[in-house]
Amino acid sequence: MPLRRVTFTFETKLIQRPVIYELGKEFEIVTNIRRAEVNHDSGWVVLELEGTVDEIDRGLAWVAEQGVGVSSLEGDILAG
Amino acid sequence: MQLLPMRGPVEKLPNVQSLRCKECGRDYPQEPIYVCDFCFGPLEVNYDYEEISKSISRESIEDGPLTIWRYDQLLPADRENAVNIGAGMTPLLKADNLGREVGLNNLWIKNDAANPTHSFKDRVVSVAATKAVEFDFDTIACASTGNLAGATAAHGAKAGMNTMVFIPSDLERGKILGAAIFGSVVLVNGNYDDVNRLCSELGDDRRWAFVNINMRPYYSEGSKSIGYELAEQLGWRAPQHVIVPVASGSLFTKVYKGLQEFAQLGIIDGADTKMHIAQPFGCSPVARAFIEGQAHPKPVIPDTIAKSLAIGSPADGYYSVGIANKTGGSGTIVPESEIAEGMKLLAETEGIFTETAGGVVISTLRRLVREGVIGPDEETVALITGTGLKTLEAIADSVETKTIDPTVRSFDEIVMGTAVS
């Protein structure tokens, strides 16, 4: 099953919401957190997702719609 | 991304111990890898500073070539293998005219537009290409909308490697040709995200040296040479302030690292340099995170005329924010309208035509002096990373010209502004 490494960034309003739990529940995606930091007003999580390419794409689009910052672990490759 | 096997053994360099995870500290062998399997932290070259300290000195550096390879003991590749088209040792110019204009008595411009393909990217690609040769890759690749394309294409040509430079097909013709002259440019019908995704997929299943993916730990080290050069060209000392244009943040972190390494090795007495982030309004995730007190920049969709800074998801943004905080630096967001103003100001005062990123830097400089962040006598370096000739469209509406008839009368009237009776 394809794997994808991503970073989520959370603003204050989303800190208390279990977005990663919801991602795993709403989509056929296994989430595996590797590194994270949450403080009083923001947070970020580095995690690996396992699922089909389509399901991961759909799941990440949903996460972004919730207001979470989504980026690939590599960051943007296309450079100036 | 999967690791691809090397075809040949790589000789261990005496100055490098390993690749080390910046987060958990796990060590990895010197291979074309870039991320820690355990915690997904980025890998960075881990040097044997004790060994290096036995042989490096100001004199040993001064005896080296007039390129980045004079600092080879602090680079992760062998100078004997260098893919060298002359990157580095660009001018550090005292900018008295600009200094007077903005209110600084001790201002310097580091002009990296003087590199072979006219940007600082020659530094990083020279190291990445050399490492690609050492790893026995036959293909070097990148995805770029500008400077990286030219630098990779040129170094690939010099190395005699297959070169794959991916460029969005709607990029300005001048930029395409500037890379295509070296051969091997591939135009992709698609937008920014499409090219990113394609290259990520290609990087997964091709045995290529992708300069800013699997070669990233080595590639990024090339930027340290700017820090070394600043110290050397200032007479072996670190400046009090450096203003750096930030895209991925790699350049920012490595200029800082270069200065710190020189201090650690006793090449300079210390490095208390304040590091200042400069970003344009249309793509400012790192500066914004600094200003808002966030550790981790939130990704954005870039919409700026400073195309070389259009990295919405900056891989080293987190580390850049940390360094700016640690050094007492700053983060500045420059309005898009001020970018061309900064370019013009530098051109009209110092005779240097910078790319848009330099316009962001000069406008940041002006703001930092105005706000008292930089004092009038504090030694400051503004980093100019590329030439304006690649971004002519940015200043098309800002530059005035006068057209006359081929007569002295017309010249006097229109140019001199003198009425002729």
Image (cartoon, coloured by chain):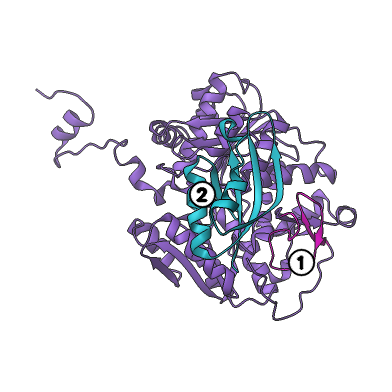
Query: For the view shown, which residue lies furthest in the front direction?
Result: A25
In the image, which disc is placed on residue B113?
2
- Chain A tint in image: cyan
Question: What x and y, as percent, mark residue B415?
Answer: 23, 31
* Residue type, label 2: Ala
The residue under the point 35% across, 62% down is B169
The stretch of residues the image draws in magenta is B15-39
- Chain to which the residue tagged by mark 1 belongs: B
Report the residue marked by disc 1.
Answer: B30
- Chain to which the residue tagged by mark 2 belongs: B
Q: CA separation, marks 1 and 2?
A: 31 Å
Q: Is residue B290 magenta?
A: no
Q: Earlier in the sequence, mark 1 or mark 2?
A: 1
Question: What x and y, as percent, mark residue A25?
Answer: 58, 52
Say whether residue B170 is left or right of residue B244: left
> Please, what secondary structure does the residue beneath circle 2 have?
helix
Q: Quadrant of the C terminus of chain B?
A: top left
- Chain B tint in image: purple
Query: For the view shown, which residue lies furthest in the left direction?
Result: B421
Vertical placement of residue B220 versus B243, above or below: below
Depth order, front residue of B413/B352: B352
In this rendering, does residue B150 appear at all?
no
